[in-house]
Amino acid sequence: MERKGHEEGVSMIEVHVPKLFPTLSIRDTLTVEKWYVEENDVVQPGDLLVSLETPPGFFDIPTPPSITVPHHVTQILVAEGDQARLGDLLIRLEPYSVNEQA
């Protein structure tokens, strides 16, 4: 579900479409039903990020378990109503610092 990247020394979290059920394959398309967050929002551990529609039903995707401190949403890559496949990048998050408040 997540992969970490390093961009200018910052640890970024990338959330990809996870294998939501055993028969989900790369050929299956899922629809981004609803984003619970927007770019620049601050998310907490356990917050819901997105709802994906699949043939068996809807699945809510929370922040990854590795997030133990607040993060901010830097980029949403798939819009509501658009389709995605297993492994597609959905959203990027970076650690949030109180110093970032303007």
Image (tube, rainbow, N blue to C red):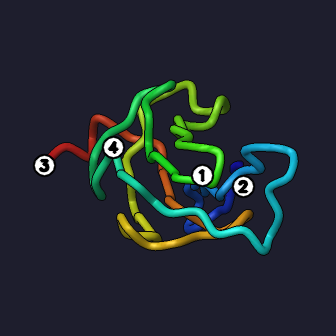
Q: Nearer the viewer, residue 37 or 96?
A: 37
Mark closest to the chain's N terminus, 4 or 3: 4
The numbered dot on residue 3 is: 2
- Label 3 neighbourhood size at 10 Å, few (<14), some (14-19), many (20+)? few
Q: Decide: is 34 above or below 64.
A: below
Q: Position of residue 43 (x, y in %)?
A: 38, 36
The numbered dot on residue 36 is: 4
Residue 29 lies in quadrant: bottom right
- Label 1 neighbourhood size at 10 Å, few (<14), some (14-19), many (20+)? many
Q: Which residue is mark 3?
A: 102
Mark closest to the chain's N terminus, 3 or 1: 1
Q: Amino acid at mark 1?
A: Ile
Mark closest to the chain's N terminus, 4 or 1: 1
The numbered dot on residue 13 is: 1
Spatial CA distance of label 3 from label 1 is 23 Å
Q: Amino acid at mark 4?
A: Tyr
